[in-house]
Protein backbone atom coordinates (compact mmCIF):
# COMPACT_ATOMS: atom_id res chain seq x y z
CA UNK A 1 0.00 0.00 0.00
CA UNK A 2 1.50 3.35 -1.07
CA UNK A 3 1.84 5.85 1.76
CA UNK A 4 1.11 9.55 1.12
CA UNK A 5 1.27 12.38 3.64
CA UNK A 6 -0.83 15.54 3.56
CA UNK A 7 0.56 18.47 5.54
CA UNK A 8 -1.06 21.65 6.84
CA UNK A 9 0.01 24.17 9.45
CA UNK A 10 -2.96 26.51 8.90
CA UNK A 11 -6.12 24.57 8.06
CA UNK A 12 -8.30 22.78 10.56
CA UNK A 13 -7.86 19.04 10.75
CA UNK A 14 -11.27 18.30 9.27
CA UNK A 15 -11.00 20.83 6.46
CA UNK A 16 -13.47 19.98 3.71
CA UNK A 17 -11.03 19.89 0.79
CA UNK A 18 -8.06 18.37 2.59
CA UNK A 19 -9.57 15.86 5.00
CA UNK A 20 -12.98 14.98 3.55
CA UNK A 21 -12.36 15.20 -0.18
CA UNK A 22 -8.69 14.54 -0.84
CA UNK A 23 -7.56 12.43 2.10
CA UNK A 24 -10.83 10.53 2.45
CA UNK A 25 -11.09 9.77 -1.26
CA UNK A 26 -7.44 8.68 -1.44
CA UNK A 27 -8.00 6.29 1.46
CA UNK A 28 -10.97 4.78 -0.39
CA UNK A 29 -8.74 4.47 -3.48
CA UNK A 30 -6.35 2.27 -1.51
CA UNK A 31 -3.63 4.66 -0.37
CA UNK A 32 -2.21 4.67 3.14
CA UNK A 33 -3.08 8.29 3.95
CA UNK A 34 -1.54 10.29 6.78
CA UNK A 35 -2.65 13.84 7.61
CA UNK A 36 -0.23 15.91 9.68
CA UNK A 37 -2.04 18.89 11.22
CA UNK A 38 -2.43 20.87 14.43
CA UNK A 39 -4.69 18.31 16.05
CA UNK A 40 -3.11 17.74 19.45
CA UNK A 41 -3.41 13.94 19.34
CA UNK A 42 -2.80 11.01 16.99
CA UNK A 43 -5.84 9.06 15.88
CA UNK A 44 -7.35 6.92 13.15
CA UNK A 45 -10.34 8.73 11.63
CA UNK A 46 -13.53 6.99 10.58
CA UNK A 47 -12.68 7.52 6.89
CA UNK A 48 -9.45 5.54 7.24
CA UNK A 49 -7.11 8.54 7.39
CA UNK A 50 -4.40 8.42 10.07
CA UNK A 51 -4.13 11.83 11.74
CA UNK A 52 -0.76 12.74 13.21
CA UNK A 53 -1.04 15.77 15.44
CA UNK A 54 0.34 14.85 18.83
CA UNK A 55 2.07 17.84 20.35
CA UNK A 56 0.98 20.25 17.60
CA UNK A 57 -1.31 22.97 18.94
CA UNK A 58 -3.18 25.50 16.80
CA UNK A 59 -1.42 28.86 16.53
CA UNK A 60 -3.24 31.91 15.18
CA UNK A 61 -0.33 34.28 14.52
CA UNK A 62 1.85 33.88 11.44
CA UNK A 63 5.11 34.18 13.38
CA UNK A 64 3.98 31.68 16.03
CA UNK A 65 3.06 29.19 13.31
CA UNK A 66 6.41 29.61 11.58
CA UNK A 67 8.31 29.15 14.84
CA UNK A 68 6.17 26.52 16.58
CA UNK A 69 3.86 24.73 14.15
CA UNK A 70 5.78 24.47 10.87
CA UNK A 71 8.88 22.71 12.30
CA UNK A 72 6.72 20.12 14.06
CA UNK A 73 4.57 19.47 11.00
CA UNK A 74 7.65 18.93 8.83
CA UNK A 75 9.45 16.73 11.38
CA UNK A 76 6.42 14.47 11.92
CA UNK A 77 5.74 14.27 8.18
CA UNK A 78 9.31 13.25 7.35
CA UNK A 79 9.22 10.55 10.03
CA UNK A 80 6.47 8.83 8.04
CA UNK A 81 8.89 8.10 5.14
CA UNK A 82 6.10 8.44 2.57
CA UNK A 83 6.27 8.02 -1.18
CA UNK A 84 4.70 11.46 -1.68
CA UNK A 85 4.17 14.61 0.42
CA UNK A 86 1.25 16.90 -0.38
CA UNK A 87 1.17 20.29 1.41
CA UNK A 88 -1.51 22.99 1.50
CA UNK A 89 -0.06 26.23 2.88
CA UNK A 90 2.27 28.86 1.37
CA UNK A 91 4.18 29.03 4.65
CA UNK A 92 5.33 25.45 4.02
CA UNK A 93 6.96 26.33 0.68
CA UNK A 94 10.53 26.75 1.99
CA UNK A 95 10.47 23.56 4.09
CA UNK A 96 8.97 21.76 1.08
CA UNK A 97 11.87 22.89 -1.11
CA UNK A 98 14.29 21.56 1.47
CA UNK A 99 12.39 18.26 1.40
CA UNK A 100 12.80 18.22 -2.39
CA UNK A 101 16.55 18.78 -2.02
CA UNK A 102 16.59 15.77 0.30
CA UNK A 103 15.01 13.66 -2.44
CA UNK A 104 11.34 13.66 -1.37
CA UNK A 105 8.52 13.99 -3.89
CA UNK A 106 6.40 17.01 -2.96
CA UNK A 107 3.12 18.49 -4.26
CA UNK A 108 1.98 22.05 -3.56
CA UNK A 109 -1.84 22.35 -3.40
CA UNK A 110 -2.63 25.99 -4.22
CA UNK A 111 -5.99 26.88 -2.65
CA UNK A 112 -6.05 30.59 -3.49
CA UNK A 113 -4.42 33.30 -5.55
CA UNK A 114 -1.85 34.14 -2.88
CA UNK A 115 -0.61 37.52 -4.20
CA UNK A 116 -4.21 38.71 -4.64
CA UNK A 117 -5.13 37.52 -1.14
CA UNK A 118 -2.21 39.42 0.42
CA UNK A 119 -3.53 42.66 -1.04
CA UNK A 120 -6.55 42.50 1.30
CA UNK A 121 -5.04 41.07 4.50
CA UNK A 122 -6.21 43.41 7.26
CA UNK A 123 -3.26 42.59 9.53
CA UNK A 124 -0.70 43.75 6.95
CA UNK A 125 -0.11 47.53 6.88
CA UNK A 126 -1.68 48.95 3.74
CA UNK A 127 1.59 50.42 2.47
CA UNK A 128 3.24 46.98 2.56
CA UNK A 129 0.53 44.97 0.82
CA UNK A 130 1.48 45.59 -2.82
CA UNK A 131 5.23 45.08 -2.25
CA UNK A 132 4.58 41.90 -0.26
CA UNK A 133 2.14 40.65 -2.90
CA UNK A 134 4.82 41.16 -5.56
CA UNK A 135 7.42 39.33 -3.45
CA UNK A 136 4.99 36.49 -2.74
CA UNK A 137 4.29 36.12 -6.45
CA UNK A 138 8.00 35.93 -7.28
CA UNK A 139 8.72 33.47 -4.47
CA UNK A 140 5.78 31.24 -5.35
CA UNK A 141 6.69 31.21 -9.06
CA UNK A 142 10.34 30.44 -8.29
CA UNK A 143 9.49 27.77 -5.72
CA UNK A 144 6.93 26.07 -7.94
CA UNK A 145 9.68 25.13 -10.40
CA UNK A 146 11.29 23.04 -7.68
CA UNK A 147 8.16 21.10 -6.73
CA UNK A 148 7.38 17.63 -8.04
CA UNK A 149 3.93 18.86 -8.97
CA UNK A 150 1.31 21.57 -8.46
CA UNK A 151 -2.38 21.04 -7.72
CA UNK A 152 -4.58 24.06 -8.54
CA UNK A 153 -8.15 24.57 -7.32
CA UNK A 154 -9.35 26.71 -10.24
CA UNK A 155 -8.41 27.36 -13.88
CA UNK A 156 -7.26 30.91 -13.05
CA UNK A 157 -4.85 29.61 -10.42
CA UNK A 158 -3.64 26.81 -12.70
CA UNK A 159 -2.65 29.34 -15.36
CA UNK A 160 -0.12 30.89 -12.95
CA UNK A 161 2.04 27.77 -13.04
CA UNK A 162 3.83 25.62 -15.60
CA UNK A 163 1.32 23.34 -17.37
CA UNK A 164 3.97 20.62 -17.51
CA UNK A 165 3.83 20.13 -13.74
CA UNK A 166 0.31 21.34 -12.88
CA UNK A 167 -3.01 19.51 -12.57
CA UNK A 168 -6.37 21.21 -12.08
CA UNK A 169 -8.39 19.56 -9.30
CA UNK A 170 -11.43 21.79 -9.04
CA UNK A 171 -13.05 22.33 -5.65
CA UNK A 172 -16.34 20.70 -6.56
CA UNK A 173 -18.80 19.22 -4.05
CA UNK A 174 -18.75 15.59 -2.94
CA UNK A 175 -22.04 14.60 -4.55
CA UNK A 176 -22.57 11.47 -2.45
CA UNK A 177 -22.43 13.52 0.77
CA UNK A 178 -25.49 15.61 -0.17
CA UNK A 179 -27.95 13.04 -1.48
CA UNK A 180 -30.00 12.75 1.72
CA UNK A 181 -30.16 16.53 2.25
CA UNK A 182 -32.03 16.87 -1.06
CA UNK A 183 -34.87 14.62 0.12
CA UNK A 184 -35.49 15.54 3.76
CA UNK A 185 -38.04 18.39 3.67
CA UNK A 186 -40.34 19.19 0.71
CA UNK A 187 -39.39 22.61 -0.61
CA UNK A 188 -42.86 24.21 -0.28
CA UNK A 189 -43.01 23.25 3.42
CA UNK A 190 -39.75 24.98 4.35
CA UNK A 191 -39.65 28.19 6.41
CA UNK A 192 -38.19 31.33 4.85
CA UNK A 193 -34.67 30.46 5.91
CA UNK A 194 -31.50 31.69 4.22
CA UNK A 195 -28.39 29.56 4.81
CA UNK A 196 -24.77 30.61 5.05
CA UNK A 197 -22.18 28.25 6.53
CA UNK A 198 -18.51 29.21 6.32
CA UNK A 199 -15.99 31.70 7.62
CA UNK A 200 -17.73 34.85 8.79
CA UNK A 201 -15.63 37.81 7.71
CA UNK A 202 -15.91 41.23 6.09
CA UNK A 203 -15.21 39.55 2.74
CA UNK A 204 -18.02 36.99 2.87
CA UNK A 205 -21.10 39.18 2.63
CA UNK A 206 -22.95 38.37 5.85
CA UNK A 207 -23.37 42.06 6.72
CA UNK A 208 -24.83 42.75 3.27
CA UNK A 209 -27.18 39.78 3.74
CA UNK A 210 -28.49 41.25 6.98
CA UNK A 211 -28.96 44.63 5.31
CA UNK A 212 -31.00 42.91 2.58
CA UNK A 213 -33.07 41.06 5.19
CA UNK A 214 -34.04 44.40 6.73
CA UNK A 215 -35.66 45.29 3.39
CA UNK A 216 -37.68 42.09 2.95
CA UNK A 217 -38.52 41.41 6.61
CA UNK A 218 -41.83 43.28 6.33
CA UNK A 219 -42.98 40.84 3.64
CA UNK A 220 -41.44 37.53 4.69
CA UNK A 221 -40.66 35.95 8.07
CA UNK A 222 -37.06 35.62 6.98
CA UNK A 223 -34.32 34.15 9.16
CA UNK A 224 -30.63 33.62 8.52
CA UNK A 225 -29.19 30.25 9.50
CA UNK A 226 -25.57 31.21 10.16
CA UNK A 227 -22.81 28.71 10.81
CA UNK A 228 -19.06 29.15 11.15
CA UNK A 229 -16.44 31.02 13.11
CA UNK A 230 -16.05 34.79 13.19
CA UNK A 231 -12.82 35.91 11.54
CA UNK A 232 -12.26 38.55 14.22
CA UNK A 233 -13.95 40.33 17.10
CA UNK A 234 -14.75 43.40 15.02
CA UNK A 235 -17.00 41.57 12.55
CA UNK A 236 -18.69 39.68 15.39
CA UNK A 237 -19.46 42.94 17.21
CA UNK A 238 -20.76 44.53 14.01
CA UNK A 239 -23.10 41.66 13.19
CA UNK A 240 -24.37 41.16 16.73
CA UNK A 241 -25.18 44.88 16.86
CA UNK A 242 -27.18 44.78 13.64
CA UNK A 243 -30.93 45.39 13.68
CA UNK A 244 -31.52 42.01 12.03
CA UNK A 245 -29.43 39.96 14.47
CA UNK A 246 -32.70 39.01 16.20
CA UNK A 247 -33.52 37.14 13.00
CA UNK A 248 -30.24 35.20 13.01
CA UNK A 249 -29.91 31.67 14.35
CA UNK A 250 -26.18 31.46 14.99
CA UNK A 251 -24.95 27.87 15.23
CA UNK A 252 -21.22 28.42 15.69
CA UNK A 253 -18.82 26.04 14.00
CA UNK A 254 -20.92 23.26 12.45
CA UNK A 255 -20.17 19.62 11.73
CA UNK A 256 -20.94 18.37 8.25
CA UNK A 257 -24.17 16.58 9.38
CA UNK A 258 -25.31 19.76 11.13
CA UNK A 259 -24.66 21.80 7.99
CA UNK A 260 -26.57 19.32 5.85
CA UNK A 261 -29.51 19.47 8.24
CA UNK A 262 -29.68 23.27 7.90
CA UNK A 263 -29.43 23.06 4.12
CA UNK A 264 -32.25 20.52 4.06
CA UNK A 265 -34.61 22.98 5.75
CA UNK A 266 -33.64 26.25 4.05
CA UNK A 267 -35.16 28.00 1.05
CA UNK A 268 -31.91 29.25 -0.46
CA UNK A 269 -28.20 29.64 0.13
CA UNK A 270 -26.19 32.86 -0.09
CA UNK A 271 -22.56 33.06 -1.21
CA UNK A 272 -22.15 36.83 -1.45
CA UNK A 273 -18.37 37.10 -1.33
CA UNK A 274 -17.21 40.68 -1.69
CA UNK A 275 -15.20 41.81 -4.76
CA UNK A 276 -11.68 41.43 -3.42
CA UNK A 277 -8.91 40.47 -5.88
CA UNK A 278 -8.74 36.90 -4.58
CA UNK A 279 -12.51 36.31 -4.38
CA UNK A 280 -13.10 37.48 -7.94
CA UNK A 281 -10.76 34.94 -9.52
CA UNK A 282 -11.17 31.84 -7.32
CA UNK A 283 -13.97 29.29 -7.52
CA UNK A 284 -16.33 29.05 -4.55
CA UNK A 285 -16.69 25.68 -2.86
CA UNK A 286 -19.75 27.09 -1.05
CA UNK A 287 -21.59 27.62 -4.34
CA UNK A 288 -21.11 23.96 -5.23
CA UNK A 289 -22.16 22.79 -1.74
CA UNK A 290 -25.42 24.73 -1.91
CA UNK A 291 -26.09 23.35 -5.39
CA UNK A 292 -25.32 19.82 -4.22
CA UNK A 293 -27.89 20.18 -1.42
CA UNK A 294 -30.54 21.22 -3.94
CA UNK A 295 -30.70 24.84 -2.82
CA UNK A 296 -31.11 27.73 -5.25
CA UNK A 297 -28.03 29.92 -4.85
CA UNK A 298 -27.78 33.71 -4.58
CA UNK A 299 -24.17 34.56 -5.30
CA UNK A 300 -21.82 37.37 -6.31
CA UNK A 301 -21.94 38.36 -9.96
CA UNK A 302 -18.32 37.40 -10.62
CA UNK A 303 -17.65 35.47 -13.81
CA UNK A 304 -16.34 32.49 -11.83
CA UNK A 305 -19.78 32.23 -10.18
CA UNK A 306 -22.12 33.39 -12.94
CA UNK A 307 -20.67 30.94 -15.47
CA UNK A 308 -21.72 28.09 -13.17
CA UNK A 309 -25.02 29.46 -11.82
CA UNK A 310 -26.33 30.95 -15.05
CA UNK A 311 -25.13 27.94 -17.02
CA UNK A 312 -27.05 25.55 -14.76
CA UNK A 313 -29.98 27.98 -14.24
CA UNK A 314 -29.78 27.13 -10.53
CA UNK A 315 -30.07 30.53 -8.87
CA UNK A 316 -29.17 34.14 -9.43
CA UNK A 317 -26.11 36.36 -9.28
CA UNK A 318 -26.17 39.96 -8.14
CA UNK A 319 -24.00 42.82 -6.94
CA UNK A 320 -22.79 41.54 -3.55
CA UNK A 321 -22.20 45.08 -2.27
CA UNK A 322 -25.79 46.25 -2.89
CA UNK A 323 -28.37 45.18 -0.26
CA UNK A 324 -31.25 46.47 -2.40
CA UNK A 325 -30.22 44.25 -5.31
CA UNK A 326 -29.71 41.29 -2.96
CA UNK A 327 -33.14 41.85 -1.40
CA UNK A 328 -34.77 41.96 -4.84
CA UNK A 329 -33.30 38.59 -5.80
CA UNK A 330 -34.16 36.92 -2.49
CA UNK A 331 -37.71 38.33 -2.59
CA UNK A 332 -38.17 37.05 -6.13
CA UNK A 333 -37.13 33.52 -5.12
CA UNK A 334 -39.27 33.58 -1.97
CA UNK A 335 -42.25 34.75 -4.04
CA UNK A 336 -42.04 31.91 -6.56
CA UNK A 337 -41.32 28.69 -4.63
CA UNK A 338 -42.02 26.46 -7.64
CA UNK A 339 -39.39 28.25 -9.73
CA UNK A 340 -36.94 28.27 -6.80
CA UNK A 341 -37.46 24.55 -6.22
CA UNK A 342 -36.80 23.89 -9.90
CA UNK A 343 -33.57 25.92 -9.68
CA UNK A 344 -32.43 23.82 -6.75
CA UNK A 345 -33.15 20.61 -8.62
CA UNK A 346 -31.22 21.81 -11.66
CA UNK A 347 -28.28 22.74 -9.44
CA UNK A 348 -28.21 19.29 -7.87
CA UNK A 349 -28.38 17.69 -11.32
CA UNK A 350 -25.50 19.87 -12.52
CA UNK A 351 -23.37 18.74 -9.59
CA UNK A 352 -24.03 15.09 -10.43
CA UNK A 353 -23.28 15.54 -14.13
CA UNK A 354 -20.59 18.26 -14.24
CA UNK A 355 -19.34 19.52 -10.89
CA UNK A 356 -18.88 16.54 -8.59
CA UNK A 357 -15.75 15.86 -6.60
CA UNK A 358 -16.07 12.27 -7.75
CA UNK A 359 -15.21 13.48 -11.27
CA UNK A 360 -11.98 15.05 -10.02
CA UNK A 361 -10.55 12.13 -8.07
CA UNK A 362 -9.31 10.11 -11.06
CA UNK A 363 -7.26 13.15 -12.11
CA UNK A 364 -5.64 13.31 -8.68
CA UNK A 365 -4.87 9.59 -8.42
CA UNK A 366 -3.47 9.57 -11.97
CA UNK A 367 -1.26 12.54 -11.09
CA UNK A 368 -0.07 10.71 -7.97
CA UNK A 369 0.72 7.54 -9.91
CA UNK A 370 2.79 9.36 -12.51
CA UNK A 371 4.76 11.31 -9.90
CA UNK A 372 5.40 8.26 -7.72
CA UNK A 373 6.37 6.09 -10.67
CA UNK A 374 8.55 8.84 -12.16
CA UNK A 375 6.78 8.74 -15.49
CA UNK A 376 5.90 11.69 -17.72
CA UNK A 377 2.99 13.91 -16.83
CA UNK A 378 -0.33 12.71 -18.33
CA UNK A 379 -1.37 14.83 -21.30
CA UNK A 380 -4.76 15.91 -19.91
CA UNK A 381 -3.61 16.95 -16.42
CA UNK A 382 -4.42 20.62 -16.84
Image (spheres, grey):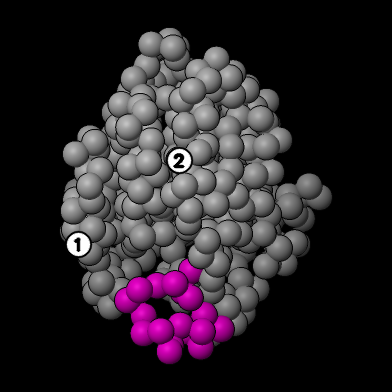
Range of residues picked out in magenta: 117-134
Find numbered disc 1 in the image and state the secondary structure of the residue it sits on: helix
Q: In this rendering, would 33 be left or right of 342? A: left
Q: Is residue 119 magenta?
A: yes
Asked whether the residues under the numbered discs 1 and 2 touch, taking CB atoms below 8 Å apart as contact, a structural biologist would say no
- Identify the residue at image location x=30%, y=26%: 221
Q: Residue 243: image x %, image y %?
A: 22, 47
Name, please, the residue furthest toward the front. Answer: 218
Of tags 1 and 2, the one toward the viewer is 2
The residue at which mark 1 appears reads as 233
Find numbered disc 2 in the image and state the secondary structure of the residue it sits on: helix
Q: Is residue 55 magenta?
A: no
Front-most of residues 352 and 343: 343
- Identify the residue at image location x=62%, y=76%: 141
Residue 144 occupies quadrant: bottom right
Kindly identify which numbered label has been placed on residue 327.
2
- Asked if residue 80 shows in the view, the reply is no
Amino acid sequence: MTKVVHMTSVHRTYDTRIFIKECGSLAVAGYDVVLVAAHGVDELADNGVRIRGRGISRQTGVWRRWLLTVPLVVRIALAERAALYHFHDPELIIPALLMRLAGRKVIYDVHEHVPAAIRTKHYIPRALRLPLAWIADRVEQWASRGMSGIVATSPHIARRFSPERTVLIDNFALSSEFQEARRRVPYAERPFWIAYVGLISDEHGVLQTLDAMAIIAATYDVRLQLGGNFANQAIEDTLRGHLMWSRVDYHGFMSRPEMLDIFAQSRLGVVLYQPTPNNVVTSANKVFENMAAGLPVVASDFKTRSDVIDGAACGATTDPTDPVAIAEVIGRLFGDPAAADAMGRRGAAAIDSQFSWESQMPRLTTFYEHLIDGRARPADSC
